[in-house]
Image (tube, rainbow, N blue to C red):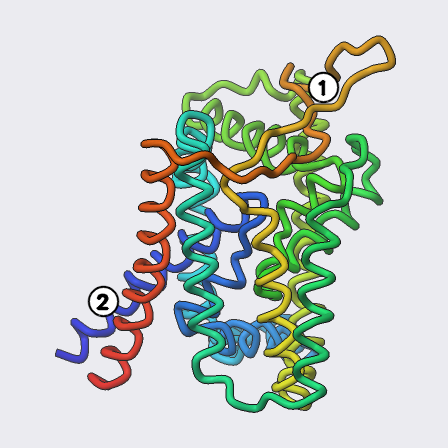
Amino acid sequence: MQNTRSLKDRIFLVIKGLGMGAANKVPGVSGGVVAFVAGFYEEFIFSLQRVNKIAFKLLFNGRFKSFYQYINGKFLSLLFFGMIVSYFSVSKILDYFLKNYELYVWSLFFGMIIGSIYYINKDFKDWNYKSILSLVLGIILGVAISFLDPAKENDNLLFVFFCGIISVSGMTLPGFSGSFVLILLGNYVLLLVDAVNALYDTFTELFSGNFSFIKNEVRLRLLKVLGVFTLGSVTGLVSFSHVLSYVLKHYKNITTASIIGFIIGSLGVVWPWKETIFKTKDDGSFLFDSRGEKVIANYERFLPELSGETYFAIAYIILGILVVLALEWYGQRTKKDL
């Protein structure tokens, strides 16, 4: 029975990784929210915090088993496996639905974030002037970020490294969408679409015995960009985890209140009823990215008119809330079984 439960837990951990990976790629949605709602946020931060000088000492001394156990390797490996699979599978499915059923996808995420706010807030009882102030500041910061204008695409490697550090914060800070920050920095398409697709195409060619990519300068440039972005992401992930671990340990109430506020503020980013505003040149023509698609400038939000489409969208919002409540119910049931 224990082995079956362990296998089930491993499968669900991979699924949670799939959820985090998919959420990290959607502008406005935070992978950290998935971790928070699914009940493994603190273990995630604690495990990342163990990637420190002691861990590297064990690694360089060849004590691989001790290193793996010290950093909670089984937990991290299954979770990151799910994230990696997500980037090449689930995220592609998500891209399809965002392109063809955009309103309903945003509605589902909007509902899930509302459910997340309920989930985080229901057990939080320490409301005082400090936590209320933190809540308000979190809301203001979240709303302010949602109305910023995106910059132009920039493939300077130092800037790409910086993008990696900043974007990965969405995994460690619930409510802070790393992919939306990449849109603001102008590098969303370059780093999460073009570079990822370049790696996917390269692996596909390698498995078929095709090494022509070696002579493809554009492909090599994208792979170099992805490598630097990944290095920046790992750096950010480890460094942010140490900071957050300290903050959660010493200022848990203020941090939780700030997270609740930040998630509330992020609702503006995922508001389902919005029109995409594209960047234009001085002559009024649209700007296009490296894929030949229009460059997003920002979103114009509006209140919907009552129609069949609106009712369906509201139904998806309710579905999103129910998904989070179902995850909470599953988490509570799992704790009782243990």
In the image: residue 135, left or right of residue 313: right
Location of residue 291 in the rendering, given as x and y in whole percent from the top left corner? 63, 18
Q: Is residue 291 above or below residue 237?
A: above
Q: Quadrant of residue 198?
A: top right
**Relative vertical location of residue 176 with respect to residue 146 in this rendering, above or below:** below
Q: Which residue is labeled 2 in the image? A: 8
Q: Which mark is residue 217?
A: 1
> What's under tag 1, amino acid-wise?
Glu
Residue 61 visible in the displayed image:
no
Give the residue type that dot 2 points to.
Answer: Lys
Q: Nearer the viewer, residue 284 or 324?
A: 284
Cα distance, mark 2 to mark 1?
Answer: 45 Å
Q: Position of residue 229 (x, y in %)?
A: 70, 45
Q: Residue at x 12, y 78 (%)?
A: 1
Q: Position of 206 compared to 336: left or right?
A: right
Give me the residue at 77% from left, 44% from top: 148
Disc 1 element: helix
The structure residue drawn at horizontal position 54% and vertical position 63%, both measured from the top left corner, is 32
Q: Residues within 10 Å of mark 2 (few under 14, many from 20)?
A: few
Q: How many marks?
A: 2
In the rendered image, the vertical position of residue 207 relative to residue 47, given as above or below: above
Question: Which of marks 1 and 2 precedes in the sequence?
Answer: 2
Quadrant of res 118:
bottom left
Percent x, y for residue 144? 75, 54
Nearest to the eye among marks 2 and 1: give it: 2
Q: Is residue 307 left or right of residue 88?
A: left
Residue placed most toward the observer, 337 or 217: 337
| Point 70% across, 77% down: residue | 134
* Residue 93 spot, x, y in % from top left: 39, 34
